[in-house]
Image: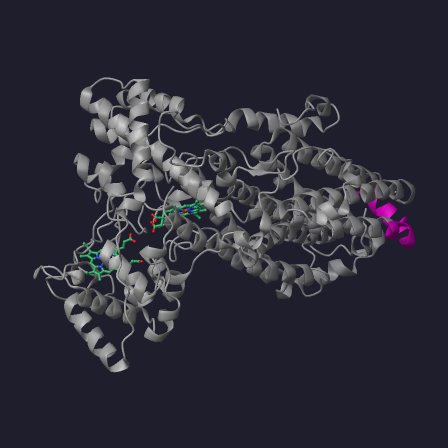
Amino acid sequence: MVNPSDSALASGVNASQSSKVYRWAAFVSCLTFPLIWLGGLVTTHDAGMAVPDWPGTFGYNMFLYPVTTWLFGPFDLLVEHGHRLLASLVGLIAIILCFVARKHEPRRFGRIACWLLLLAIISQGILGGVRVLLDARVVALIHGCCGPLVFALACGIVMINSKDWKTAPKSIESNSLRWSLRILLVLTIVQLIMGAHLRHALPQWKPSLFLSFVHTHLLVAMLITGIIFAVFCTVISPKFRGVTGLRGPAAWLVGLVIIQVCLGVGTWISSYALPWQELNEFFARYTIDGRGFVETMIINGHQATGSLLIAGSLWLLCRVERRYVAAAAYGAVPAQVADATPRSLVR
Amino acid sequence: MRFAQSPIHLLNLGNVSLLICSVGILAAGCSKPSFEANRLAAASFLESQDQQKVDELAGSVGELVEQVFGPPDAPKWPENAPTAVDMAEVERCAGPVGRAYDKVERGLYRKHCVQCHGITGDGAGPAAALLAPYPRDFRRGTFKFKSTSIGSKPLRSDLVKTIEHGLPGTSMPAFGALRNRPEFEKDIESLAEYVVFLAIRGEVERRLLKRAVDSEETPSLEDAKRVAASVAELWVNASANVVEVPLIPDVPPAEYAASVERGKALFTSDQASCFKCHGNEGKGDGVSQDYDEWTKDWTIRVGIDPASKSEWKVMKPFGALKPVVDRSRNFHLGGLRGGSTEQDIVKRIVLGIDGTPMPAITVSETDPNAFNLENVFDLARYVASLTGVKPETEAATDSGTANSAKGAQ
């Protein structure tokens, strides 16, 4: 819904002011993504316990741990300590972001979002520490699920500070598109949680439990793919001819979901092979390369693309929400007409 | 014990809701991993599906075995048993994954193997149901690809080979990449030790269950130790059962073609009867397809038809997975699991594949009913030709002959 104070502010916001928040938030997002990737590596290499203590590293202050021992030591230590250092950097920049927002962000919810991000990053850091101190795979699982959510939140802050958010004309009245995207966002998050459960499968789980996670993961994958294609077809349809700014994100989502499905199949094959080895020569001869480089990259790629899908859905959702006009307020106005509605008419 | 700090003081720092949530899940879903009692074997030996009876037997024997071999986080070796495994390496593989202050990496088994083979080595890890063939259940003490005769224990080198090179066409990965980093160099050997530990532990449990059912009384701790000693003995003496595998000679191209022809004739002869399982063309489509020993133990041997869901379903509560036929190999697809060279195939034909329908053939130069060496070479060349292996290439890549195999300590 259109928030009156919001749009008033939006028009009043000085572009250079908010672009500062935008840039710092973008910085956090750009660093959070490799952080997730590195976190994935920690899991793939089971390096979570490569360093037995936290917040120190082998008794050292984390930032004073000798660089050579870190860089040239065991691989799992390299990954785990690197993850910690990068995480600290992200936390630091999030603090800066909060101060920048305090000064330059006139919208209350914009400032709250920044503080929430900082809180989320700190919690995520502590969760990572608890994982090490308690040596609990369950905490690793929660830590793994929350990582991409933090990334999505950072991307969300970027989006609400973008030019599009502030200038987008109210031009859509398709409630179904809006709801599809809301459902899509929820599904991509659910999917990520399912995926994390598959990755962090606890050794004492019964095969039937794992099986039900696999089935859910596949079902949700189909739903997500279906929704994304439906949304894409909708935004390229004649009905949306006059609406700008939706086709780009939708096309990105289509591309991402195609990559993601391929990576998902690849992840299964490179972790568990296919149960139908008599299918063809390739599968009959295929031997999983345990801890191989390509395998690791496919598995991590699948996880990272999952985060991108969440961010992508959020991106498109933001754009649609911003362009949405309650049909009730306008009656059945064709898109072009709605497009031409003077901004002053927005309540 | 590893961490001097208590995590409690962190609680007030953190986001309380997240912590409460994590503690909730911790309490609900995460008990410490423990060795599970072999309820499937108990139910099979008892020939009963009475939950209470089975649990009682499996539980009491399980406790006994735990006293002898310790829990997964603190394995121990029965004092009087001959040393069949290197306990230092076993300890390094057991327990949770991580690196303590001494910077020694621990928990290798949970890091690399547990999602398929399970904590107990029962081949029923979380992912097991989705794999075909199912991961190996070590507890029977039976291994497929080895250089010893059917029914005897494999050598360390056989296990190391499997772990290092994996098994093509199955989910068993090749962990050879571990050799590329100095800190993981010896991990494969350590893991082989742990596999042996789990196999001995599991077999002791099975034998005790059988004994308990046969004698109708719960075995004592002394019994358990005696059984442990005798099972360990088998592993210590594994190298005595190594079968000498003859080296396949190179032949000139003209003779090679004739040899392959003879092999083809033998393959489809009633004497060798390979075709009955592998099909006339070696496509794995012969009339006779059977289950492996792990499946037969709890199905055919206790009067359950593995092909009928309503019958095998009764064993599901005890951890049984859907019985799957152990299909004979289709040679045209290649990817032989015991190795694809002619020499590997000779070895397979002479040794058979333990635990599966694939028999070992008897080689004798004097007995007219048995095969002679030339017959075996002909068969091997024929099978190799079906997989597309060229005769020139494999003479150079001759892998494990029995002679080069390292004995088990």
Residue B12 position in % (x across, y down):
74, 23
Query: In the rendered structure, does residue B169 fall within the stretch colored magenta?
Result: no
Give the vertical position of A235 relative to B132 (above or below): below
**Image quarter (top left, top right, bottom left or bottom right) of the N terminus of chain B:** top right
**Residue at image x 51%, y 32%?**
B95
**Residue at image x 43%, y 43%?**
B192
Magenta stretch bounds: A1-20
Circle count: 0
Residue A187 position in % (x across, y down):
57, 46
Is B41 in front, or is A59? A59
Is B96 in front, or is A265? B96
Query: In screen coordinates, is A43 left or right of B13?
Result: left
Residue B121 position in % (x across, y down):
39, 37
| Residue A249 in view here | yes
As drawn, the residue found furthest toward the left would be B368
**Residue at image x 60%, y 31%?**
A135
Is A180 in front, or is B176? B176
Q: Quadrant of residue B396?
A: bottom left
Query: In screen coordinates, is A3 left or right of B63?
Result: right
**Image quarter (top left, top right, bottom left or bottom right) of the C terminus of chain B:** top left
Query: In screen coordinates, is B382 left or right of A18?
Result: left
Give the vertical position of A25 relative to B259 (above or below): above
Query: In screen coordinates, is A114 left or right of B333?
Result: right
| Residue A1 in view here | no
Magenta: main secondary structure equals: helix
Residue A76 position in % (x across, y down):
63, 45
